[in-house]
Amino acid sequence: MISFDFEYYKPTSVTEATNLFQSLTKQGKDPIYFSGGTEVITLGRMNQIQTDAVIDIKGIPECLVLKKAEHKVTFGSAQSLTKIHEMQIFPFLNKAIVEIADHTARNKITLGGNLCANIIYRETVLPLLLTNSEVVIAGTGGLKQVPLQDVFDQKLNLEKGEFLVQVITEQSEIDCPFLCVKKRRQWDVGYPLITTAALKKDGYIKVAFSGLGTFPFRDKNIEESLNIKQLAIEERVDQALQQISVSILDDVNGSADYRLFVLKNTLLDVLDALEGGENV
C-alpha cells in the first residue's frame, strides 16, 4: 500500500502534459511523469519515492506509436516491452527485452520506464546505444530529436519538466549482426550478473554493458582494444579489460573478481561469434 496521497492526471497531448507539469510545479507540487508505473508503485510502497501528482503519458498518441517505415522503426515510450517484442521488428532490442524480469512484469514495464528507471540494469538502453538510436524528448519548448548517446550518461539526462516521447532507429543499424548475453549466478532466475550487448558494423565491433557497474554504459576505449585485429583474441580481451573505467560491482550477486571472470569469457564468446557474423 502506498502511504501518501497524490493527484492523477492523464493528458491527451504532449502540450497538455508539459503545460500540466509547469502548472503543478507553480502550485508548489512535485509532479512526475508516469507510463508503466511499476517502479513508482514499488518504490512508493517502500517509501523510497513520494510525489504530489503523477502525469500518465499513456493517453498521448505519440507515446504509443509502434511502426516500421521504409528506413526506420519508431517506438513510443509508453509502449510495453511485451508489445514491442511482439512486433518482431528489432531483433537486437527483442533479445534484451526477453531477458528482463518475467512475462507478467514485461506486460506493464514500458520502454520509457525501463530507460528512465532508477534500477541499475536498464538493459533496453544497450542495443539502442549501439545502433545509434535517437530519442524524441518533449519539454516546454516543444519536441526535439537528438542522438541517445548525447543525452545518456549513466542515465537518461532530461531537464526538469521533460519526458521521453519516442525512440527512433534506422533500419540499416537494425540489420547489423549482434549478440546479447545475460549472465546470472543461476542462469534462469535472479538478478543479472552482467549483460553484454555487442554489434558489428563495417567490420567494427561495438559493446555495451549492464550490471558491471551501477549503471549501463558503452566504452569506446574497450571497443578499440577489442578491434585490434593484429592481436590474438585473448590478448584483445585482456587489453579491453584493462580499459574498464567504472567501479566494478562487488555484492551478493557476485564479487568484482567473479564479474571480471564472467566478462572475460563473455567477450571471448562475443569475438568468436561476431567475427563469424552470427546473431546469438
Image (cartoon, grey):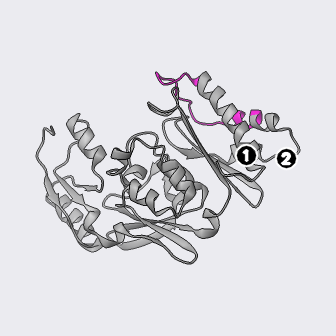
Relative vertical location of residue 145 with respect to residue 152 in this rendering, above or below? below
Asked whether the residues under the numbered discs 2 and 1 touch, taking CB atoms below 8 Å apart as contact, a structural biologist would say no
| Number of numbered discs visible in the structure rendering | 2
Nearer the camera: disc 2 or disc 1: 1
Residue in front for this viewpoint, 216 or 27: 216
**Residue under label 2:** 229
At 21% from the left and 43% from the top, the residue drawn is: 50
On whether residue 140 falls in the magenta region, the answer is: no
At 76% from the left and 32% from the top, the residue drawn is: 238
* Mark 2–mark 1 distance (CA, rounded to whole Å): 15 Å
Residue 64, image x, y percentages: 35, 67
**Residue under label 1:** 273
Viewport quadrant of the N terminus: top left
At 40% from the left and 50% from the top, the residue drawn is: 114
On whether residue 255 falls in the magenta region, the answer is: yes
Residue in front for this viewpoint, 92 or 126: 92
Please give left or right for residue 27 compared with residue 70 in the image: left
Query: Dot 1, how many residues are within 10 Å of its Cα: few (below 14), some (14-19), or many (20+)?
Result: some
Judging from the image, what secondary structure is the residue with disc 2 in? loop
Residue 154, image x, y percentages: 49, 46
Residue 51, image x, y percentages: 19, 47
At 16% from the left and 40% from the top, the residue drawn is: 2
Judging from the image, what secondary structure is the residue with disc 1 in? helix
Please give left or right for residue 87 compared with residue 22 in the image: right
Please give left or right for residue 196 compared with residue 12 in the image: right
Question: Mark 2: which amino acid?
Answer: Lys
Residue 188, image x, y percentages: 49, 33
Relative vertical location of residue 188 with respect to residue 178 in this rendering, above or below? above
Residue range highlighted in magenta = 238-256
Sequence-first disc among 2 and 1: 2
